Image (cartoon, rainbow, N blue to C red):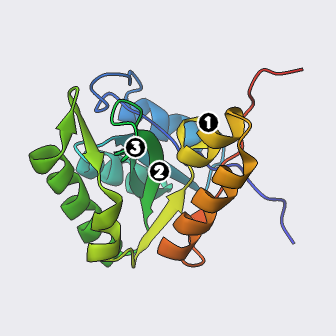
């Protein structure tokens, strides 16, 4: 069995207007140079760079993975949304992500950011989407950081039910000894 190779699943590019500076061509070139079989573009709540990224990745022999780093509305504390990374596993997933992001920008903006409503995921379905927990910025990570393991477990179970077999917990260094 060949050795596993690293693949970036979270990349904010120049199209993440508030927090990205990575140029798509440079990221794809570096991924190909490092022998990465694939690379994900997951800009903050948008798919603006998708076509440019897709073409560059295909030309470089790197499998393009499309997704978005999404804000999720917090029903109990509106000023404390959580994060959820959504990756498209199929055309249906891409269309669902487009619908979710469009709804968020048109119907649920808060402090200049588009926030997904959990209810939309149940309403639209999650077929074709893979979800990553958002690490420390996700609701599971936030609950763990607050020392509330039962709330973290409950949130993880809810997400796993929404994304059966397609929800993954992200691990992140927290800088603790």
**Residue at left offset 34%, top offset 73%:** 122
Is residue 62 visible to us here?
A: yes
Residue 96 image point, x, y percent: 27, 69
Left-right relation of 177 to 117? right
Secondary structure under the numbered disc 1 in the rendered image:
helix
Left-right relation of 45 to 102? right
Q: Which of 113 and 143 is in front in this view?
A: 143
Residue 155 image point, x, y percent: 58, 58
Secondary structure under the numbered disc 2 in the rendered image:
strand
Q: Residue 85: give its label.
A: 2
Reading the chain from its start, which is encountered first: label 3 or label 2?
A: 3
Reading the chain from its start, which is encountered first: label 1 or label 2?
A: 2
Mark 1 touches mark 2? (CB < 8 Å): no
3D distance between C-alphas at marks 3 and 1:
18 Å
Q: In which quarter of the image is the N terminus?
A: bottom right
Q: Is residue 164 above or below residue 143?
A: below
Secondary structure under the numbered disc 3 in the rendered image:
loop
Mark 3 touches mark 2? (CB < 8 Å): no
Left-right relation of 128 to 47? right
| Badge nearest the viewer, 1 or 2 | 1
Residue 85 image point, x, y percent: 47, 50
Residue occupied by mark 1: 136
**Residue at left offset 55%, top offset 55%:** 132
3D distance between C-alphas at marks 3 and 2:
21 Å
**Residue at left offset 38%, top offset 21%:** 21
**Residue at left offset 69%, top offset 33%:** 145
Reading the chain from its start, which is encountered first: label 3 or label 1?
A: 3
Farthest left residue?
106
Mark 3 touches mark 1? (CB < 8 Å): no
Residue occupied by mark 3: 76
Q: In which quarter of the image is the C terminus?
A: top right
């Amino acid at each position: 069995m060949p050795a596993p190779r690293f693949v970036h699943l979270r990349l904010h590019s120049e199209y993440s207007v508030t927090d990205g500076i990575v140029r798509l061509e440079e990221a794809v070139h570096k991924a190909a140079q490092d022998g990465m079989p694939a690379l994900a573009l997951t800009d903050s709540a948008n798919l603006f760079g998708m076509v440019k990224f897709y073409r560059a990745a295909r030309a470089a022999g790197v499998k393009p993975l499309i997704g978005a780093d999404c804000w999720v509305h917090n029903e109990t504390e509106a000023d404390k949304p959580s994060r959820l990374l959504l990756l498209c596993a199929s055309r249906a997933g891409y269309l669902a992500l487009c619908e979710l992001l469009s709804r968020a920008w048109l119907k649920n903006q808060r402090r200049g950011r588009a926030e997904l409503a959990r209810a939309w995921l149940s309403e639209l379905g999650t077929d074709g989407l893979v979800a990553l927990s958002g690490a420390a910025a996700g609701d599971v990570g936030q609950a763990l950081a607050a020392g509330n393991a039962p709330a973290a477990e409950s949130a993880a179970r809810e997400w796993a039910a929404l994304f059966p077999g397609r929800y993954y917990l992200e691990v992140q260094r927290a800088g603790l000894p």
